Image (tube, rainbow, N blue to C red):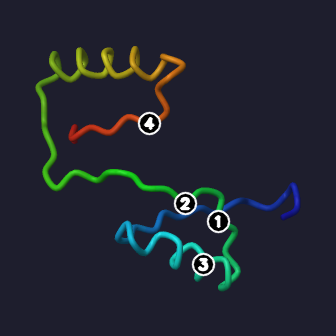
Amino acid sequence: MRDDEESIGACFYTERSDIASVTEALRTAGWSVTRSEMGYRPEETTTLDAERLEAAEAFLEAIDDHDDCHSIYTTLA
């Protein structure tokens, strides 16, 4: 890609057992796959009032600042 070109990204979700085959299929189709990993998407989300959401976000930011933290998953909407 040239420096003046925009990078367009996308997320693809699949079953855990299909990660390798989907990654390979995307590469075969010409996609540049930069990351292929398991993640988490909640089935239900949680909504908090403003005060509790602010406290939860502060807590999550503190965790995220820790060197040993690599990913954080929540059910917050």
Q: Are marks 3 and 1 in contact (CB under 8 Å)?
A: yes
Question: In the image, what residue occupies the spot 30% across and 22% down?
Answer: 57
Separation of marks 2 and 1 at Cα, in angstroms: 7 Å
Q: Secondary structure at mark 4?
A: loop
Separation of marks 4 and 3 at Cα, in angstroms: 24 Å
Q: Amino acid at mark 2?
A: Ser
Using a 10 Å C-alpha cutoff, classify the residue at mark 3 as few (fewer than 14 neighbours), some (14 to 19) or many (20 or more).
Answer: few
Question: In the image, what residue occupies the spot 13% across and 39% down?
Answer: 46
Query: Which labelled disc corresponds to residue 71?
Result: 4
The spot of residue 20 in percent (x, y) is 53, 72
Separation of marks 2 and 3 at Cα, in angstroms: 11 Å
Q: Of callouts 3 and 1, which one flags the residue occurring earlier in the amino acid sequence?
A: 3
Q: Are marks 2 and 1 in contact (CB under 8 Å)?
A: yes
Separation of marks 2 and 4 at Cα, in angstroms: 14 Å
The spot of residue 31 in percent (x, y) is 67, 74
Using a 10 Å C-alpha cutoff, classify the residue at mark 4 as few (fewer than 14 neighbours), some (14 to 19) or many (20 or more).
Answer: few
Using a 10 Å C-alpha cutoff, classify the residue at mark 1 as few (fewer than 14 neighbours), some (14 to 19) or many (20 or more).
Answer: few
Query: Which labelled disc corresponds to residue 14?
Result: none
**Which residue matches tag 1?**
33
Along the line of sight, the residue nearer the viewer: 19 or 3: 19
Along the line of sight, the residue nearer the viewer: 7 or 28: 28
Q: Of callouts 2 and 3, which one flags the residue occurring earlier in the amino acid sequence?
A: 3
In the picture shown, does residue 77 fall above or below 7? above
Q: Secondary structure at mark 3?
A: helix
The spot of residue 59 in percent (x, y) is 30, 16
Q: How many marks?
A: 4
Query: Which labelled disc corresponds to residue 26?
Result: 3
Q: Amino acid at mark 1?
A: Val
In the picture shown, does residue 45 fall above or below 1? above
**Which residue matches tag 2?**
36
Q: Are marks 4 and 3 in contact (CB under 8 Å)?
A: no
Separation of marks 4 and 1 at Cα, in angstroms: 19 Å
